[in-house]
Amino acid sequence: MSRPAVGKALAQWGAVFIKEIKDAWRDRRTLRMVLLLSLVQGPLVLLLVSTLASEKENRIDKREIYAQGMQYAPGLQNFIERQAYTIKVPPADAMDKLAAGQLEDAILVVPADFEQRLHAMEMPAVEIYANSSSRGSGTARDLVRKLLQSYAQERVALTLVLRGVAVASLQPLEVQERDMANANARAAQLTGAMIPLYVLIAVLTGAMGAAMDSTAGERERSSLEPLMMNPVSPWALALGKWGAVALLAALIALLTSLSFIPAQLLIRSDVLQALFRYGLSDALRFGLICLPFAGAVAAVLMASSIRGKSIKEAQAGNSLVLMVFMLLPLVSLLNDAAEPDWYYLVPSLAQQTLMLHVLRAEPIALWQWLLPSAIGVVLTIAGLAYVGRAMRSNAVR
């Protein structure tokens, strides 16, 4: 291609790009809503995660358990109170509330013959009533179970001492655990995949509206045909529209990533607040990771929308695209081992994996950066080729 032809193509692309930016700017209400959502999603996500963690911490710190029939087990009651726990008698309708999920706790039921069977060297049975569908009830159940196990170990130790048997003979090994995860990795374990997933969702939802408006929306308003009658090549037209949509998607990715910095002030969990470290460099790396993904998403959504005669038609195809991109990161939740290399070949899953590396402060190899970027470039080229071919073949009328 000669230099004048290249200059002409760039001029056409620039004209279309500026036109699309102006159109998006005119619809300020929608633009403000999209940008506002990208700013508030970070604080809302961290507030939600930290609230859940704080509730669990408060339940543990409260040091209260519900127990029924504790008068039949004075030794167990003494042990629990020595652990600085308060024993509360459950209300009369506690079982019904527990079954209905209205009681966020567990209930320990001690039989009347508990102490007699214990002294007779028999095995008394106690019952723990909990609702496994309730997060709080499950936490309380685990707490009561640990208390009972500790009491049983103490009873065994006292029995052995009274009979002249060394307690150490039951435990010939001393196990010392060493957590090799750094503080960032432990914080990432608490936040899970939620933060990267919300960044990806923000990019997808933000790009979808712009992609549909620049293709199916223009067809619905009957403004695409006059635009194509101008002396602008279909490729320049497709590239200009893509540039505006990709720019908006990249901006949303950056704003959403940056929003997690002030969002740390809203963290309600003391543990998460002490562990979670997220700064400007992390946000910029998030934005850099999402940059090729934003371009690919813009191209794919435009290709999905170009055949639609209205925004409603385009939404049907784009809903499937969004569902695929949103479900792919869930693959990592099914894998407890280290992520395999093929993760970096899958769009959205690769970006989520890289962002988790950033949250854990783990090093990222050069190929781990380049491979997802190359896949994003390939998807971008394929999507733009489809859009340009659709326009050039007069499929859009």
Image (cartoon, grey):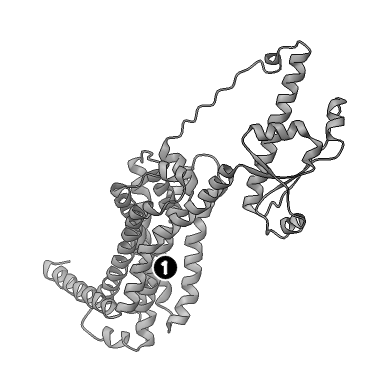
Which residue occupies 46% across, 71% down?
Answer: 318
Q: In this view, does 54 lie above or below 210?
A: above
The three-letter code of the residue at mark 1 reads: Thr
Where's residue 94, x and y in %? 74, 55
Nearer to the camera, 45 or 181: 45
Dividing the image into 4 quarters, which one contains the N terminus?
bottom left
Where is residue 346? Give x, y as percent: 45, 53
Q: Quadrant of residue 293?
A: bottom left
Q: Residue 6: tell me if it is visible.
A: yes
Quick check: can you spot residue 395? Answer: no
- Residue labelled with disc 1: 205
Q: In this view, does 137 lie to the left or right of 333?
A: right
Q: Is residue 192 above or below residue 215?
A: above
x%, y% of residue 93?
Answer: 76, 58
Identify the secondary structure beneath mark 1: helix
Residue 139 in picture, x, y percent from top left: 63, 46
Image quadrant occupied by the C terminus = bottom left
Q: Badge 1: few (under 14), some or many (20 or more) residues near its Cα, within 10 Å?
A: some
